[in-house]
Image (cartoon, rainbow, N blue to C red):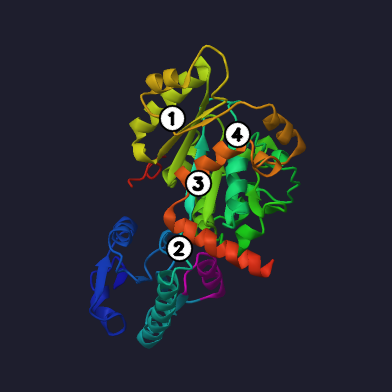
Amino acid sequence: MNILWDTDPGATERYRFALGVDTQALDSAAMVARAIHDNPQVEQIVIGSDIPIDRACELSEATRLDRPEIGVILLRSRVDVTTLSQALRAGIREVVASDDHTALAEALRRSRELTSRLIGHASGGSAREGRLITVFSAKGGVGKTTLSTNAATHLAHSGLRTLLVDLDLSFGDVAISLQLVPAQSIYDAVSMSGHLDDEALRGLVVTHEESGLDVLCAPNDPGDADRIPVPTVSEVLKVARRSYDYVIVDTPPSFTEHVLASIDVSDALVLIATLDIPAVKNLRVAIDTLDMIGSPKDSRIIVLNRADAKVGLRPEDVEAAIKTPIAVNIPNSLTVPASVNRGVPIVLDEPKSPVSLSMKELVDSHIRTGRDDEVGSAAAAVGQTSSRKSLFRGRK
C-alpha cells in the first residue's frame, strides 16, 4: 500500500499512473504518522512537491526508526544537489522530479523491491528484536550498577549478544566497575541522531574481553549529560534492540526523562531495594509512580539486595510494605565490594558463591525467555566450534 502526502486534492489523480489504485492520500504529517502506526500494510510513502523539505525529512527520519522497511520518495519541482544531500541524510530513498511520472514509477518499483528484501530478511528471523531490561532504584547505594554489570556479564558469558548501557549520564560507574577505558560514549551518538545504525553503534561500544559483553559507557564529563537529547537515547535503544539479544540499561536513582524513555521500551523492569526504611520507602514511591504513568505491573521484577542482613527488617516486611512479592533475594557478602574494586564481576570471579547463584537465578528465571534460550544455545554452539501503550510518547 502507498501513502501520498500532498495538500493538493488532485494529486492522487495526477500521479495515478505511477501510484496505482492502492494509494491513500493524506494532507498532514500527523495523519501520515497515524496511518503508518495503525496500518502494517503501508510500504511506500510519496511526499508531494509542496511539502517543505524540512518536514519531509522529519517524517522520513521518524519512519526510519519505527518502520525501517518503509520506502520514502520525495517529489520536487526542481531537483538540486542541496535537496539530494538533505534527503539522503534523512533516509529518503529517492528524489524525483514531480512532472516525471515515468521516473516516479521506476523509483517506486525499485523501492518496493528493497522493501520486499527488508521484510523477507526480518521474517527470516535474523532481524528479531532483542529484549531490553531496565534496572532501576529510586535510591542510590543499593547495588544497582553491581547487579546490572553482573546480569549483563552472565548473559554475555552464556553466549548471548548483550549490550550494557550506562544511562547514569552524569555519574555512571559501569566503565570503572569493569575496568574499561572507553574511547567513545553515548554522548558521541548525539552527532549521529537520526542516522544511527548498527555499524555506528558498534563504533561507540567497548568490549569487556573476559565475558564478551559490549558496553556503551556514560560520558566522562558530567556536563555532557544535559547535552544528550532524549530522542537520541530512544534512537540508541531502538538500534540496540535490533543488534543484540539483550540490552541491559543501568540508570540513575531518579525518574529522569532519559530513564522514562528507557522504561517506555523495556520488556522488563528490575526494581531494587535493600533492608532499610529509606530504600523500602523509595521503592514504594517508585511503584506508585510507575502505576500512575501506566507501566505494566507484570513486567516488574522486585529484587532485594543484601536480603539476609541483620538490621531489624525482614524480607517479609518489605513485601508487606510494597504489596508486591519479591522475585529474588540476594544475600549480603563482603566478596561483592572486593570484586567491584578489582573490576571483575563476581559471576566470573566466584561463580559458585551464593551471591553469584542468586544473580544467575534472576537472569535465568526472570529475564531470559525460552525463545532466547534457543538463541543462546545456538550461540554457545558456534562459540565452541569457532573458539503497550507508550509511557514516553507524548511527553514534552
Going from N to C along the chain, the mark reached first, 1 or 2, is 2
**Real-space Cα separation, disc 4 to disc 2, in angstroms:** 34 Å
The boundaries of the magenta stretch are: 80-93
The reply to whether residue 370 is in sight is: yes
Q: Residue at x 54, y 46 (%)?
A: 248
Compared with residue 376, is residue 17 higher up or lower down, i.e. above or below? below
Between 358 and 368, the one lying in front of the other is 358
What residue is pinned by disc 2? Answer: 128
Q: Residue flagged by tag 3: what amino acid is it?
A: Asp
Which mark, residue 354?
Answer: 4
Going from N to C along the chain, the mark reached first, 4 or 1, is 1
Image location of residue 345, percent across then percent down: 68, 41
Please, what secondary structure does the residue beneath circle 4 have? Answer: helix
Say whether marks 4 and 2 touch (CB < 8 Å): no
Q: Does the segment drawn in magenta span residue 81? A: yes
Image location of residue 378, percent across then percent down: 54, 65
- Marks 4, 1: nearer the viewer: 4
Q: Quadrant of the C terminus?
A: top left
Q: Residue at x 53, y 59 (%)?
A: 376
Q: Residue at x 64, y 35 (%)?
A: 170
Q: Does the segment drawn in magenta span residue 280? A: no
